[in-house]
């Protein structure tokens, strides 16, 4: 069986991957009360067009209704909602002006902006995709009404789901306010307990990546709460400062745990369960109870026990000892300087203490919040850079080709074909072949289910019932793209049926087949499918962040405050996580089956992850008295890693491959040799890439 599994190529196995996630019952309830009831209200009041547009808006908002705090939900749903309304306004304006063949260059321009926005983070990517989709639907769907009124209807549907998000949410954990933020911080301790339980086994590295993902989610939630509080000129509450200190304790505990994982020795169960007690304390509001007894077997275990004790002290405090924020009428100092490698003010995501109290100007706080949620705080996210231009050109060409073919085949209902391409061609959403296969299978299943419902149900209200069923399925369908396509197809066919095209179900299968063919052909053109544009840029940024962290570890003065180190380590892990996701997606592309044409990005990312792990373990040992490396040893290591990043960024750059430095073993700090060994594994990559 293992041999057979290895024989299946990644591009063929990827369409069958299924994510195992808990059922979001609150989101299922919200989905049930969105598209279906809104469409039914439009039918009942004699305004089917309004029901279709509001239902469409709620469907698009439902795609972004993911787990998280209320504030993250507001921005993750709200920004794409504004983009959807803007797209409907542009598309309806094109239709009112008499959309003809000149709609092709117009959609080419919108597609370029949508694709280029993919490099700026997931929120901007979703906003760009939905703006493009509503532009196409607004230009093609024959619905009455002024363009501004259509845009308002779409926005109203999005806001309806957002209102339900604020009302219908998961039960609040015990122990006071900040329920969402407390929950995401608790997941950090849970993930850390799982990682410690996997120490010494093959699941240690994947478990460490889950810890990084949990830290990212908690980082975003706490930063966003702090920034929105400054926008509203609200005082920092004592419980917010306490939660920030607890997350800082979790960050320090994670650093010590990485050093334990690097030693690759199984740990007693009581050690792994200690972070779990902190998670339960966050959820229940009760003390964490008895923790594991300290040991002195190694520097990593000593650092872990000290971090565990510091966390216990923080959890024992009823309120933080930090000063409270001054009232809005009092003068405040300037905004704190950004933490290195993060692009945002020091906060609970890495520094050793919460940010100093103070109030930023509203425009500054708003800009910081926008940069945080859209991904602009991270390097290599320029829409006008090589990756942005490559993304934009790929989407624009596919959309223009699909629109031209659709106008030739079916000028009256041309919108389905380019709308289908919109959800397929986005480069950051997965391999093209996998998405096309799942899109076709999901559309076929959705059409058959819709046709079956039409045979069983009667009356004018049954499309609203089908749309409600699709809305309830949508949150659960995030496990697989084919299942998500089934839910969206059911809702869209309901909208189209009510808008006056009952025969559209059969046409959708043919249009989807053509769209999949266009994406597979145009999307795999050599100049549009080069993985260096989207993967190489992420890998380069990850190597740069890794080099910055390694340099700080090796060159920092003894006894220095670890605030900057923690921030750099978090930035390195975050960049590596994004690079790994891009590399795994590129490895499952159809073009990756051509041996020797695609660089082995995963090898580079894995080695860089191990370098960060080794550097973290090195930092822990240096804190406990190990001899520091010489300036020459540190510089040679950092130069080698920097040369590797240069080679990945520009393979045509002249010069030899990155050298592998030879280091003498440092007493009590053997991980420096491990760093050199990881660079040795990548010695020939500069030429291969």
Image (spheres, rainbow, N blue to C red):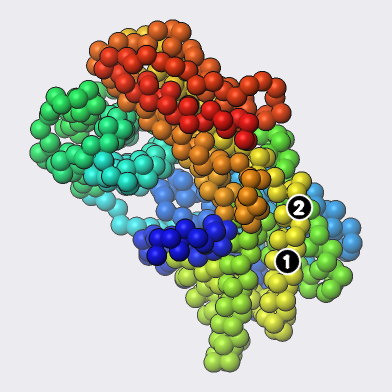
Q: Position of residue 122 (x, y in %)?
A: 56, 46
Q: Which mark is residue 397?
A: none
Total number of numbered discs in the rendering: 2
Q: Is residue 543 above or below residue 668?
A: below
Q: Is residue 127 above or below residue 418?
A: above
The answer to whether residue 54 is visible is: no
Rendered image: mark on residue 517: 1
Q: Secondary structure at mark 2?
A: loop
Please name the residue shown 41% across and 15% down the image: 663
* 408 horizontally vs 590: left or right: right
Vertical arrangement, residue 501 with respect to residue 227, above or below = below
Residue 208 vs 591, above or below: the answer is above
Q: In whole angstroms, how far apart are the C-alphas of marks 2 and 1?
A: 13 Å
- The residue positioned 70% from the left and 45% from the top of the image is 530
Image check: 651 left or right of 399?
left
Residue 489 occupies quadrant: bottom right
Residue at 56 percent across and 35 percent down: it is 539
User: Mark 2 highlights which residue?
Assistant: 525
Relative image position of residue 400 (x, y in whole percent) = 81, 57
Whether residue 526 is visible: yes
* Earlier-in-chain disc, 2 versus 1: 1
Nearer-the-camera pick, 549 or 599: 599
């Amino acid at each position: 069986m293992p041999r057979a599994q290895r024989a299946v190529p990644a591009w063929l196995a990827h369409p069958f991957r299924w994510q195992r996630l808990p059922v979001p019952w609150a989101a299922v309830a919200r989905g049930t009360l969105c598209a279906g009831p809104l469409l039914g209200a439009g039918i009942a009041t004699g305004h089917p067009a309004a029901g279709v547009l509001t239902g469409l808006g709620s469907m698009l908002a439902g795609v972004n209704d993911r787990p998280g705090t209320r504030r993250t939900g507001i921005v993750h749903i709200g920004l794409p909602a504004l983009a959807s309304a803007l797209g409907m306004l542009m598309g309806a304006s094109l239709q009112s002006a008499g959309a003809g063949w000149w709609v092709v260059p117009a959609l080419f321009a919108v597609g370029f902006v949508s694709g280029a926005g993919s490099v700026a983070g997931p929120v901007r990517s979703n906003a760009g995709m939905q703006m493009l989709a509503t532009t196409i639907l607004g230009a093609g769907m024959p619905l009455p009404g002024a363009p501004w009124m259509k845009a308002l209807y779409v926005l109203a549907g999005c806001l309806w789901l957002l209102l339900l998000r604020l009302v219908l949410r998961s039960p609040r954990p015990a122990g006071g306010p900040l329920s969402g933020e407390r929950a995401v911080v608790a997941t950090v301790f849970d993930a850390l307990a799982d990682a410690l339980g996997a120490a010494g086994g093959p699941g240690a590295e994947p478990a460490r990546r889950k810890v990084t993902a949990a830290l990212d989610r908690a980082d975003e939630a706490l930063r966003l709460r702090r920034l929105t509080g400054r926008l509203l000129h609200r005082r920092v509450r004592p419980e917010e400062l306490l939660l920030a200190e607890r997350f800082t304790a979790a960050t320090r505990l994670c650093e010590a745990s990485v050093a334990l994982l690097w030693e690759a020795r199984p740990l007693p169960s009581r050690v792994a369960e200690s972070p779990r007690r902190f998670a339960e304390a966050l959820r229940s509001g009760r003390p964490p109870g008895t923790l594991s007894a300290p040991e002195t077997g190694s520097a990593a275990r000593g650092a872990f026990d000290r971090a565990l004790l510091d966390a216990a002290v923080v959890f024992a405090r009823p309120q933080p000892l930090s000063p409270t924020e001054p009232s809005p009428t009092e003068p405040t100092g300037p905004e704190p300087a950004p933490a290195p490698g993060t692009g945002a003010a020091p906060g609970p995501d890495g520094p050793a203490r919460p940010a100093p109290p103070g109030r930023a100007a509203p425009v500054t706080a708003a800009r910081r919040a926008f940069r945080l949620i859209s991904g602009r705080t991270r390097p290599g996210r320029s829409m006008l850079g090589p990756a942005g231009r490559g993304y934009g050109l790929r989407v624009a060409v596919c959309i223009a080709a699909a629109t031209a073919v659709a106008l030739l085949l079916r000028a009256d209902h041309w919108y389905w074909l380019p709308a289908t391409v919109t959800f397929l061609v986005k480069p950051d959403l997965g391999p093209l072949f996998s998405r096309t296969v799942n899109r076709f299978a999901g559309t076929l299943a959705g059409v058959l289910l819709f046709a079956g419902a039409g045979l069983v149900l009667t009356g004018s209200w049954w499309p609203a019932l089908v749309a409600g069923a699709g809305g309830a399925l949508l949150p659960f369908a995030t496990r697989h793209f084919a299942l998500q396509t089934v839910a969206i197809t059911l809702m869209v066919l309901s909208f189209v049926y009510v808008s006056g095209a009952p025969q559209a179900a059969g046409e959708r299968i043919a249009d989807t087949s053509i769209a999949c063919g266009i994406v597979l052909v145009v999307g795999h053109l050599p100049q549009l499918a080069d993985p260096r544009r989207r993967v190489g840029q992420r890998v380069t940024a990850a190597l740069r962040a890794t080099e910055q962290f390694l340099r700080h570890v090796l060159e920092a003065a003894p006894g220095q405050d670890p605030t900057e180190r923690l921030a750099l380590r978090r930035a390195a892990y975050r960049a590596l996580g994004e690079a790994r996701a891009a590399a795994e997606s590129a490895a499952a592309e159809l073009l990756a089956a051509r041996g020797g044409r695609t660089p082995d990005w995963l090898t580079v990312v894995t080695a860089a992850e191990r370098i960060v792990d080794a550097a973290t373990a090195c930092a822990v040992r240096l804190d406990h008295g190990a001899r520091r490396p010489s300036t020459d040893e540190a510089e040679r290591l950092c130069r080698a890693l920097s040369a590797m990043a240069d080679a990945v960024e520009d393979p045509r750059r002249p010069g030899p491959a990155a050298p592998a430095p030879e280091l003498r073993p440092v007493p009590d700090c053997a991980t420096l040799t491990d760093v050199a060994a990881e660079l040795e594994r990548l010695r020939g990559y500069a030429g291969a890439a």
